[in-house]
Image (cartoon, grey):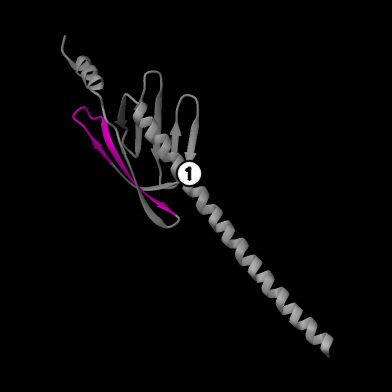
Amino acid sequence: MNVMIGIVISGLVMLSFYNAFEFINEEIKVYSGQQDALIDVLHLQIMLNKDFMQSDKVLNNGERSIELERENDHIHYRFEPAYVLRVSKTRQDTFSLGITDMQVKENNYNWVESIRLKALLEKQEIFLFFKKEYTARHLMNEEKENQWP
């Protein structure tokens, strides 16, 4: 009888350890998924900030899309409900961040001055804001191109 009681108690202890192990394993998977999503958001933010800073002008292509013009390159961003796509001459990047809303502010030349993005990250809304500061050189070059001969 004592052996049977010992077997039942040890079985209950092993079952509780197994349940604790399963719970911890699931929490680690959730945490890992959250970290991956956060890294993707940070990567997008770094890339878009860098592209905004290095571009000569940013154009709104409509339909949740922008184009960043550089001297020797054009970079296209497409903001979809399930992902963000970045395409340049040399590479293509996809960010697993769904954009639920996009607001674009333009200047007098119809260049993008700022973009405000609303996205869902792990069922929580986050907001990303990007601003392009145009230099006098950019604006003067545009004036020269648009002047009548």
**Which of the 4 image quadrants contains residue 80?**
top left
Q: Tell me the SS state at disc 1.
A: helix
Q: Is residue 77 magenta?
A: no
| Residue situated in front as seen by the camera: 133 or 122 | 133
Q: Which residue is mark 1?
A: 40
Residue name at image x 65 percent, y 71 percent = 19
Image quarter where the N terminus lies is bottom right
Near-viewer residue (9 or 117): 9
What secondary structure do most residues of the magenta stretch adopt? strand
**As drawn, 34 above or below 52:** below
Relative to residue 20, is residue 55 depicted above or below? above
Which residue appears at 82% of the width and 89% of the height?
Answer: 2
Q: Which residues are magenta?
A: 104-121
Is residue 70 left or right of 91 when viewed as pictured? left
Q: Position of residue 43 (x, y in %)?
A: 46, 40
Instruction: Give how far across and how far down residue 91 sits, in percent.
Output: 50, 29
